[in-house]
Amino acid sequence: MAGITVEGLSTVYPNGVRAVDALDLEIADGELFALLGPSGCGKTTLLRTIAGLEGATDGAVAIGSRDVTRVQPGERRIAMVFQDYALFPHMTVSENIAYPLRVRGVAKSVQRETAAKTAGGLSLGELLNRRPGQLSGGQQQRAALARAVAASAEVLLLDEPLSNLDARLRLEARTFLKKLQRELALTTVFVTHDQAEALALADRIAVMDAGRIRQLGTPREVFQRPADTFVANFIGSTPMNLVPRGSEIVGVRPEYLSAAPEGLFTGEVSIVENLGVTSLVTLDCGDDQIGYIVPEDEEPAVGTTVTVDAPPTRVLRYDRETGLLVR
Amino acid sequence: MSPLWIVRRIGFYVLITVVLAFFAVPMLWLASAPFDAKPGLGLRWPDWTLDNVATTFEHPYTLTSLVNSLVLCVIATVVTTVLAALAAYALSRVRIPGRDLLLYLLLLLSSVVTGTAAMVPIFVMMLQLGLINSQFGTALVIAGGMLPAAIFILKDFMDAVPRSYEESARVFGASPRQVLAHVVLPVARPGVATIFVWAFVNAWGNFLLPFLLLRDVGQQPAAVLLRTLYDEGGSANLTVIPVFSLLYSIPVVVLYLFVSKRYGFRFHGGIKS
């Protein structure tokens, strides 16, 4: 078991793109850690640099107390699951799972035993002799996880682990992944562009943009107190209301706003969108559009004027120049 | 059904029949003439006999030439397949400026250089290297001629092997040699099998290079020997040629069937990424 320490890490591609930019990060032993950000923010490059698949231009990566910056991927004691799972199509599930052992020259019988045991733990016991092409998406994902587990590594790296599954299966796989990580207590880093996935799975999240970390914190911290307007915009299934007021930008989540006799914003109801249990109401307040969430059956009629307010602790103020959280 | 339509159909079938006959007649000749007591150049129902086969086997050079062909082709094919696989993998993975241009030029020049145009320089070069009458030397020249096209075709197969497969193997500690042997080659196997058969068939039918470089009749492969099968009168030896032609065509057919069954020109698909 081991944590990961990243110090002043930069990864620059040959074409001059600075994908990771002087980044510092500490991931604790046994933590389930998310790298979250829009595409092109450097999150996958950071993961690949930790894995050793990309060379660090500057800075250092350590796993446990061992500096691995110049160590080959195979020597880092890591396991990785790729976005396309990278199961070898010409090998059976059993051979795939046992591959890390085959590389180390472990006896064939031990390979088969380990594969069967690992597969059993991930309910793949029936599928050992199938080829990856004969498995469903969810089964392929579990086979790839089984192979990573069989490697008995110190660190597990997952690149967009859920993005190749359809929406319903994704929820199931998310629960499964979190349970598996808790059982193994393995330091796990996963990359995602889906904020809901990061909030649901991770112990801590690093929100990234342009090769740097914009905010580092627990899902609750990142959701309730985004460090800047970029994070505020990115996190949350409905975007945060960000309204300029003088030298500041007032930020408040639609979920925290409710109708009140007097309050922050007053406007005319322009659109009501049904979200299932709740509805998203959009108010026209002069130049600004304010969204807020109402419970089912409490939707105001379009055209009525409504005033909304939020608890003072849920109203955030950002500096208009820097975009940083003031309080 | 108008009369015009009927005429058109008849015309169509006549055309098909002629085309079919064009390809079928030589095949039928190859099947019947070897076993005919009086084989001719025309197609007829044979007077069945095995005398021609016996005569062919008694000929001093026929069996040797088939063995020579086999040796020549196996060396040329193995050299081509192994070197093309390694080169195609390297060219597929390493980024060098002007790589694609280099490949096109190589392909273009090779079809010019190894052909008739370079007969004389190749002969002189091999003479000075002391490789005239050498099976191995000739096989190398044939392989050299096939390599650019083989690399070009195999590179496409190598390009189609997802990089994540290799990276996955690397993360689990596989050495570059293991990555190639465990992952890349098995996944690109249909391509390698295709190149193997293609190279063998090409080398088997190659006449010019063995004709130039193997002057000793005891060293010559079947494709070259076929040209020398005359009787005392100077006309084609029709007792030996049909049987010899049949024997000559068998290895290629067998190889194709074997490779197709064993290694398969098929693909185990991964998942879309």
Image: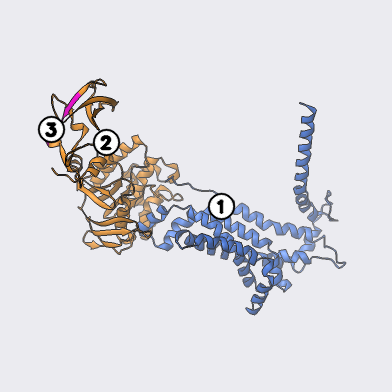
Chain colours: A orange, B blue
Q: Quadrant of the N terminus of chain B?
A: top right
Is B174 situated above or below B9? below
Query: Which residue lies at the image location 58% right of the left edge and 58% below the top edge?
Result: B196
What residue did someone put label 1 on? B262
Could you tell me which chain the residue with mark 2 belongs to? A
In the image, residue A310 lies in the stretch drawn in magenta: yes
Left or right of residue B140, residue A94 in this image? left
- Start and end of the magenta stretch? A306-312
Binning the other alpha carbons within 10 Å of mark 1 as few (below 14), some (14 to 19) or many (20 upward) gives few
Mark 2 falls on what kind of element?
A: loop
Q: Nearer the viewer, residue B4 or A233?
A: A233
Instruction: Specify the amino acid type for callout 3.
Output: Pro
Tell me the CA gap for discs 1 and 3: 73 Å
Task: Say whether disc 3 or disc 2 marks the residue closer to the N-terminus.
Answer: 2
- Give the residue at the far right of this rendering: B233
- Residue A76 in the image: state x and y as whole percent: 29, 60
User: Closer to the observer: label 1 or label 2?
Assistant: 2
Is B210 situated above or below B42? below
| Quarter location, residue B50 | bottom right
